[in-house]
């Protein structure tokens, strides 16, 4: 177990790689990082101190209500962990890294799989464990021993979530094949992640008189189930209250589920991994009726970016899924407009929300077209200036964003007033233009596969980006609601931040 | 006659390490020049500076008389660069890739389409023209990249280890194409570790180490330096760079 090739040997290798990847993801200097983590630790410690003090004054009583509330929190945690584990498990198969090396080694397959899945479980639990640890370190000082069992319960919950995710991933592989599993897992993971946010907004969609009743109904239906001390569903919550037998039983259930899932998955792992390897070699033919070609550097650059986007469903889903989080927002405005009629406030809210949405969409696209380049040397060796390349790539991001903006602008012009539609168009266009310009000024080069790491960059840059976007959101809202003069203030704030971002842009980097 | 490439006192440092050290190099128009050297000798760095992918610390680069540092766009129009790892877009087909390169180099559509067809047929990729390159083998990718490098009919073709990882048949195809290109008046410069390739196809050979050109000339001239007509290029190479570098 401890020797070369043993479980702990492999686990330490896995954790070392995770740590190195984490360190590589930051761009700041060593000193800045130390300051950042020290501040974060201090904040967590401060928050944890007061939380621990508050909790220590309460003696946990595992009655129906308390168990039900804790059980609900655990259910939310479980769903978040499940979505994260599902994405990590599928990624572990697709982003092969050292997988081929491990699979070709004499180490037994179950050992490779158990280590990889344990690393995923730890990864999934880490964020929550850090939060809980910030409280747990203070609990003994205030005599809050009874709350200490939350930490192991959460770790066990992550093992259980990883086990369920393993079964789910395998089932998807068998049902929809390796090609679609990755996309589906991502969509499913995002929907699970977003579902609680969306669910939390549901009361806002309902009418006032029904809202309270609906909440009471949900509460009355869930609490007796999640808080039933005799039910297996409440086991994690009971374990969290330090009831020794329950904690031991929960540990047994979580570990057994995890090991069984790993054992079952190990038998399929090599086949699934091989099926994914085969995907790369699959021939995909694009039919072309004519052998005509386009000419002109800008046109070919734009079409190249669009082709690459359209042909990558995984990337497309990554760009489009964040839009899901805006759904409740639009439902709120839709309800308001239905209830209150076309008041300027409702129209302004709708327009602002859409400008925020379009900014998020354009930012994702602009990173892909401007920064993510799979053949940077090829572009750099072409007889085209950097400005021409950047401009063409920014246009490739701006045009689809403008298309997305057009229907609501037309809608607002018809339903509210043409002036309202005009101001929404101006606000949306300014937001798109700003987003594309920032993408050009502050490029974070990478490959398209690194889409999730696109927001890496300095804190100040992300801060600036956010304020530019919020400025345009505010200006649009004010202008659409009839306060066009007042809209100048947030617009000036946006332009000020744009100027700052322009001035702080890196010097012309050395090619490649 | 203007040289295809003229490099004077070219220097590039990475921190304390001097990768290219006051290098002088001339490639004549219509010749196939092989640049040999051990790992880290400065071959790729030199070519990357010529292509505009790296800024030199000092020195000058002229491509057919055009100053590649002062006017990189003019130089790039005459150049094609083929790195050792083919830079393709896996979601584009071979045909679309050539369309993209032709567009970047400003080749008109009417001119580019028949040229693409000719190149794809020549390299045996015509039947695969509408397949995405993600499904291509290493050899097919290399040939697609080579077709991309030739689509705009560059006056100077620069290739970094073009035969690495290719099977014998594909390597032969590439060698034939390069020889043919030099015979028809095009200039080619390639870096390689495979001495046999340089021996067979190059008009002149340069041997570089520590960023400095140790020797250059035809095979016969280099043999003469090594002290005999029976000496192979390997003998010459090892004598110059030392057995440890082999």
Image (cartoon, coloured by chain):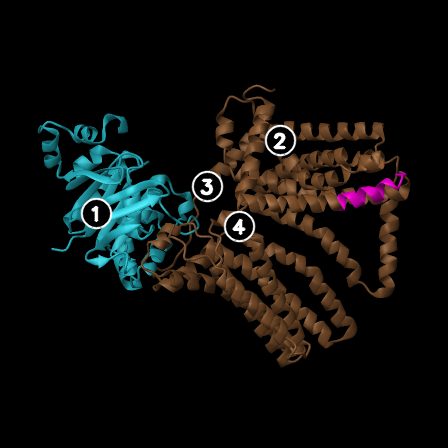
Chain colours: A brown, B cyan
Which is in the foreground here, disc 1 or disc 2?
1
Which is in the foreground here, disc 1 or disc 3?
1
Left-right relation of B12 to A472: left
Q: Residue A362: x, y in percent?
A: 55, 61
The residue identified by callout 1 is B188
Q: Nearer the viewer, residue A301 or A176?
A: A301
Disc 3 chain ID: A
Q: Quadrant of residue A21?
A: top right
Q: Nearer the viewer, residue A174 or A367?
A: A367
Identify the secondary structure beneath mark 1: strand
The residue identified by callout 2 is A265
Q: Residue B244: x, y in percent?
A: 27, 26
Which is in the foreground here, disc 4 or disc 2?
4
The residue identified by callout 4 is A451
- Circles 4 and 1 in contact, beta carbons < 8 Å: no
| Mark 3 burial class by Cα count in 10 Å: few <14, some 14-19, many 20+ | some
Whole-angstrom CA distance, mark 1 to mark 2, is 54 Å
Identify the secondary structure beneath mark 3: helix
Whole-angstrom CA distance, mark 4 to mark 1, is 38 Å
Range of magenta residues = A47-61
The residue identified by callout 3 is A280
């Amino acid at each position: 177990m401890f020797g070369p090739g043993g479980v702990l040997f492999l686990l330490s290798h896995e954790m070392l790689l995770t740590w190195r990847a984490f360190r590589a993801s930051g761009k700041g200097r060593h000193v800045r990082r130390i300051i950042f983590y020290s501040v974060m630790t201090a904040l967590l410690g401060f928050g944890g101190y007061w939380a621990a003090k508050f909790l220590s004054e309460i003696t946990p009583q595992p009655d129906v209500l308390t168990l039900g509330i804790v059980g609900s929190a655990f259910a939310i945690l479980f769903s978040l962990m499940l979505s994260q584990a599902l994405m990590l498990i599928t990624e572990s198969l697709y982003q092969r890294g050292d997988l081929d090396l491990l699979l070709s080694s004499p180490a037994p397959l179950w050992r490779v799989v158990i280590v990889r899945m344990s690393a995923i479980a730890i990864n999934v639990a880490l964020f929550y464990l850090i939060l809980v640890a910030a409280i747990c370190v203070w609990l003994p000082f205030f005599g809050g021993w009874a709350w200490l069992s939350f930490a192991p319960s959460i770790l066990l919950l992550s093992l259980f979530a990883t086990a369920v995710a393993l079964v789910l991933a395998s089932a998807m592989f068998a049902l929809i094949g390796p090609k679609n599993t990755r996309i589906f897992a991502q969509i499913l993971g995002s929907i699970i992640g977003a579902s609680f946010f969306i669910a939390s907004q549901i009361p806002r969609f309902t009418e006032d008189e029904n809202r309270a009743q609906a909440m009471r109904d949900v509460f009355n239906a869930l609490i007796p189930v999640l808080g039933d001390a005799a039910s297996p569903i409440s086991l994690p919550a009971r374990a969290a209250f330090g009831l020794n037998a329950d904690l031991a039983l929960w540990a047994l259930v979580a570990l057994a589920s995890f090991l069984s899932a790993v054992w079952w998955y190990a038998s399929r792992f090599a086949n699934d991994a091989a099926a994914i390897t085969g995907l790369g070699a699959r021939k995909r033919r694009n039919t072309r009726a004519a052998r005509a070609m386009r000419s002109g550097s800008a046109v070919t650059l734009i079409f190249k970016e669009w082709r690459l986007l359209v042909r990558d469903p995984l990337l497309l889903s990554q760009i489009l899924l964040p839009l899901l989080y805006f759904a409740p927002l639009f439902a709120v405005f839709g309800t308001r407009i239905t209830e209150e009629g076309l008041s300027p406030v409702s129209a302004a809210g709708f327009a602002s929300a859409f400008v925020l949405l379009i900014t998020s969409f354009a930012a994702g696209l602009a990173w892909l077209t401007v920064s993510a380049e799979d053949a940077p040397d090829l572009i750099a060796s072409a007889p085209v200036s950097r400005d021409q390349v950047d401009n063409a790539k920014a246009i490739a991001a701006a045009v689809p964003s403008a298309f997305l903006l057009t229907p609501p602008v037309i809608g607002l012009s018809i339903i509210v007033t043409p002036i309202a539609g005009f101001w929404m168009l101006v606000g949306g266009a300014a937001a798109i233009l700003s987003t594309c310009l920032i993408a050009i000024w502050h490029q974070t080069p990478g490959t398209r596969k690194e889409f999730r790491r696109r927001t890496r960059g300095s804190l100040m840059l992300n801060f600036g980006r956010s304020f530019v976007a919020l400025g345009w959101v505010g200006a649009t809202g004010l202008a659409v609601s009839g306060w066009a003069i007042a809209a100048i203030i947030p617009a000036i704030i946006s332009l000020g931040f744009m100027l700052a971002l322009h001035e702080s842009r890196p010097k012309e980097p050395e090619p490649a | 006659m203007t040289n295809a490439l003229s490099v004077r006192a070219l220097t590039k440092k990475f921190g304390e390490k001097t990768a290219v050290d006051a290098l002088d190099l001339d490639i004549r128009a219509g010749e196939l020049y092989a640049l040999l050297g051990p790992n880290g000798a400065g071959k790729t760095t030199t070519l990357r500076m010529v292509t505009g992918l790296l800024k030199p610390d000092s020195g000058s680069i002229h491509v057919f008389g055009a100053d590649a540092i002062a006017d990189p766009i003019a130089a790039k129009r005459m150049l094609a660069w083929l790195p050792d790892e083919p830079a393709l877009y896996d979601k584009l087909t071979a045909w679309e890739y050539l369309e993209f390169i032709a567009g970047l180099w400003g080749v008109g559509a009417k001119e580019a389409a028949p040229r693409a067809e000719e190149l794809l047929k020549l390299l045996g990729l015509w039947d695969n023209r509408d397949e995405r390159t993600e499904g291509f083998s290493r050899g097919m990718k290399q040939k697609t990249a080579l077709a991309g490098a030739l689509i705009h009919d560059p006056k100077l073709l620069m290739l970094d280890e073009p035969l690495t990882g290719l099977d014998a048949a594909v390597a032969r195809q590439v060698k034939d194409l390069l020889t043919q290109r030099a015979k028809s008046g095009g200039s080619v410069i390639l870096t390689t570790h495979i001495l046999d390739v340089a021996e067979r196809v190059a008009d002149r050979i340069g041997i570089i180490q520590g960023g400095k050109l140790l020797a250059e000339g035809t095979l016969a001239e280099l043999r003469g330096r090594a002290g005999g007509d029976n000496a192979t290029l390997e003998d010459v190479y090892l004598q110059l760079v030392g057995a440890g570098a082999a």
